[in-house]
Amino acid sequence: MAIHQNNSAGASGVRIVADRIHFNNIVLDAPTAVRILQGFPPDEWHGVVIQMLEHGAHALESAYTNATLQLVAQQLEGTVTQMQQVMLTTFTQGWETTATALQKMLTEHQKALNAYLDANSKTGLQAQMAEVFNHAGQTLFQRVAQAFAEGDESALGRYLTKFKQEVQTGFAAVAAQQAVKHHRETATTLSGLVYEEATLVALTEITRCCGDVVEHCGATFGELRKRNGDILVTVSEDMARGNDLRIVYELKRRSDGGAPFSVATMRRELRAAKENRGGHAAVFLVETAELLPAGSGTFIELGGGDYATVYTPDGSTLGLSVAHRLARLYAITSVAANGDEAGVDIEAAQRAVAEIRQGMSRLAQIRSQHNAAIGAINRAGTAAQELVDLVLEWLRRLDDILDGE
């Protein structure tokens, strides 16, 4: 985004010209902001621009006060001082000696940075900061080599200062981008959409083996001209046997400290979602266990083919997998209950469901003990994993039963 002096005549306020926002005497090149503003009446633009600036300011404040960034800056300061001492000491010994020492320090500093950064993704904070550091390090290397070739010892301090500034500026820019992304995903009205998209990806992976079709429908009107129901899963044609069997997902995400949903509220929400999307079964999905009734664990059977569970992006999909399989079985068996041929060994499926229910119930108890008793963490963790494996095994058996194997 570029900022220019607005030399055009006219009244003060907010105007849009092409991809630029004219705000009093300032012109902003901001195509994304323009698209957002165009969704509001002109008389509201002034307030919307202020909200944009406030959201951006909060995100940048988080970036520049980021503890990681401050630790990195301290590490960098010490390294630059050490580099300067070594280069001044070895200047008379020739470039080869200095180059070896400089390369060693750059490598050691890169390793030290890794202690502060997350290495989980090549597109994450560590990779981006490593790229900034490597680029600045290569530039420093070239500049110092030139100083040695020219015999200009006085330039070393200047080049090190530039190196430090380049790394700090680059790191601050990366941290700002991360903060804006985090702010978008957690503190704005877009956070719900981000959660829905993450759930859509998880459900698509879970249903891949079943052949079910997953659809993100939260932004479209349903049969009742309402938006109840965020994700719709249609059971595969082979299992549905000519019937249109649907499972509806209602996703709820509240800010920290939000009150938990009651059982009555969840049932009411799912009933509305099924009516609006033509669903046979439904799942109420929340991002944290704190949003479910106290003491209920992370998985609840609400009756009538409805379930409630927890899914946290990048977390375990066990609850989501169980909820989908049970809702799917309920939809399939509801066809048989109406007199149609289900093509499934219902008794065997019900036995598998009983084992899954027992496993989930015991898993909830174990997890409660795990959280309450620090001294029993290792024992409870092992038991919980065994139950996770048990549930997964029965889920596989249930899939085999439904596939007629």
Image (spheres, rainbow, N blue to C red):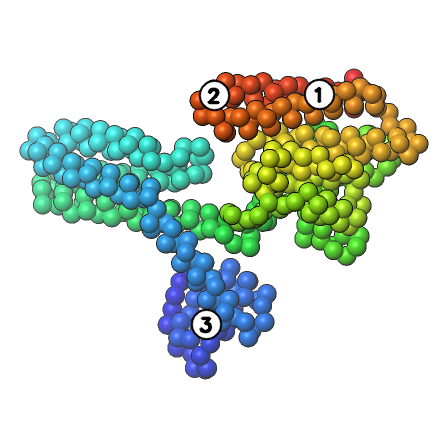
Q: State the SS at label 3.
A: strand
**Which residue is the extreme one toward the right?**
339
Q: Residue at x 42, y 46 (%)?
A: 178
Q: Nearer the viewer, residue 304 or 111?
A: 304
Image x and y of residue 128, in percent: 39, 40
Kind of residue at disc 1: Glu
Tag nearer the camera, 3 or 2: 2
Kind of residue at disc 2: Ala
Residue 355 disc label = 1
Kind of residue at disc 3: His
Image x and y of residue 223, in percent: 80, 52
Mark 3 vs mark 2, CA separation in Å: 62 Å
Mark 3 vs mark 1, CA separation in Å: 65 Å
Q: Nearer the viewer, residue 92 or 260?
A: 260
* Figure check: 5 above or below 253: below
Q: Which residue is mark 2?
A: 376
Mark 1 vs mark 2, CA separation in Å: 25 Å
Q: State the SS at label 1.
A: helix
225 on left or right of 105: right
Tag nearer the camera, 1 or 2: 2
* Figure check: 25 above or below 190: below
Image x and y of residue 116, in percent: 33, 35
**Which residue is the extreme one toward the bottom?**
10
**Which residue is the extreme one toward the left?**
92
Q: Which residue is mark 3?
A: 22
